Image (tube, rainbow, N blue to C red):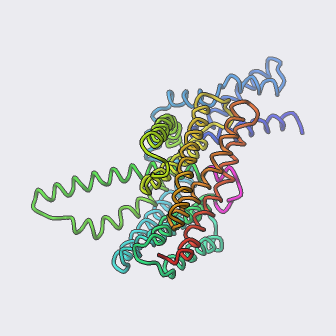
Amino acid sequence: MTLDAHLESRIAGWRSYVSGHRVISPSDIDEMEDHLREQISDLVSVGLTADEAFLVAVGRMGSLDEISREFAQEHYDRLWKQLVLTRDAGHESGALRRPRELAVVLACALGAGLAVRAGVEWLTDSALVRNAALLVLPFLTLYFAWKRDMGPRKTAALALPFGAAAVVLNVFPFEPGGVTEIIAAIHAPVALWFVVGTAYVGGDWRSHRRRMDFVRFTGEWAVYLALLALGGGVLMGLTAGAFGALGIDVEPFFEQWILPFGPAGAIVVAAWLVEAKQEVVENIAPVLTRVFTPITIVMLAALFVAVIASRSVVTVDRDLLILMDLILVLVIGLLLYSISARDPHAAPNVFDLLQVVLIAAALAVDLLMLTAMATRIAEFGFTANKVTALGLNLVLMVNLVWAARLGVAFLRGRSGFSAVERWQTRYLPVYCGWAVLAAVAIPPLFRFV
């Protein structure tokens, strides 16, 4: 390899690394690369070797956080443009693709809304709840399959899990409103979300990087969906109030059309917004994780002390166990989102210590809940709810124990952050497997009651 080729290779590696920090847009990276090349040329002209010039120039560029701050200060107007324009607005191919993508998004959102509207008309209330994910998520999967150019055969393969889920949810003789029906209705969307993830990563599910991209997308999608829900709720309330002042009752219209179409369409539109505004949204992720991590630690510690101080673990009621399980699931989601938002090349810091404290607090609560459930099972026997909760807590505990071990090792400098990240991406299929098992195996085990 010649010296010039070697230098080009190093510049290409630098650009690839910077590109992974999505807060910096492609046009900004082009500008940075031009600046880097100018500095290398100046340094070479005064006698430095190409390698020496490259290292000095990169050092002068500063860290990615400093670069991001500098670009935010110098080009703050781009942030507002990015709220309206897509990332590739400056490229002809992107400009041609944008109208097509918007049409696909609107078609998928409309299809999801029509499916939910048909479900409201033709299905019973319990069947509608069971099949809610089947009415919406196929359209979101179709959007990502189109976006990733997966092709007809791979896209058709993604329909197989939805078909299997439809059979399970509609052929199993569930008792309407029974416990096992609720368990299946809760876990089926979780399993099907991983089908959406397969489409999101373009079928490259074995890639740890792409799995973490999907984790990041899930968190950002939830943020956008919450914002759309809040905005939609306020708009509906104002509209209903205005028409009510005129003596016109619009509630029947809302119930028949807005409620079926609004949430279903928002699920697809939120995903499109995440795809279109990744550079903007990634600024939100670190802020959210740093705000909610210490708050969650305090909440978990307070709950743990309250349960121990106020009553015996044996007498913890079912509702509290369910709420604690939901809190643990949220903690895992926060942990995953925090990992996805972190710069993997940064040194350990105070926030990493807080992450380990969060994991330790979650482990303490998880062990408390396992003790309570084991006691209740020994006293009252097995039920569908108890088996589901016990299995979920065991799945979460395994993740938390190993995450704590890797987190401590990272803080002590015995391993890199990549080990922490890879453990979480490798564990994702376990969540999918448990969701499938809970939806498919537990109902017949307890005779669909």
Q: Which residues are magenta?
A: 202-212
Q: Judge by depth and name the residue closer to the eye, 345 or 301.
A: 301
Query: Is residue 358 left or right of 53 when viewed as pictured?
Result: left
Is residue 414 shown in magenta?
no
Q: Judge by depth and name the residue closer to the eye, 103 or 315.
A: 315
Judged from this view, the residue extending furthest toward the front is: 379
User: Considering only vertical position in the picture, is 14 above or below 395?
Assistant: above
Query: Is residue 150 left or right of 278 when viewed as pictured?
Result: right
Judged from this view, the residue extending furthest toward the top is: 46
- Quarter of the image with the N terminus in it: top right
Residue 358 place in picture, x, y as percent: 56, 38
Residue 163 place in picture, x, y as percent: 56, 77
The answer to whether one can see residue 108 in this image is: yes
Residue sitting at x 53%, y 74%: 446
Count of numbered marks: 0
Residue 104 place in picture, x, y as percent: 48, 65
Residue 241 place in picture, x, y as percent: 17, 55
Q: Judge by depth and name the residue closer to the eye, 145 or 218.
A: 218
Residue sitting at x 42%, y 42%: 310
Residue sitting at x 87%, y 33%: 3
The answer to whether one can see residue 78 in this image is: no
Q: Judge by depth and name the residue closer to the eye, 238 or 323.
A: 323
Is residue 210 shown in magenta?
yes
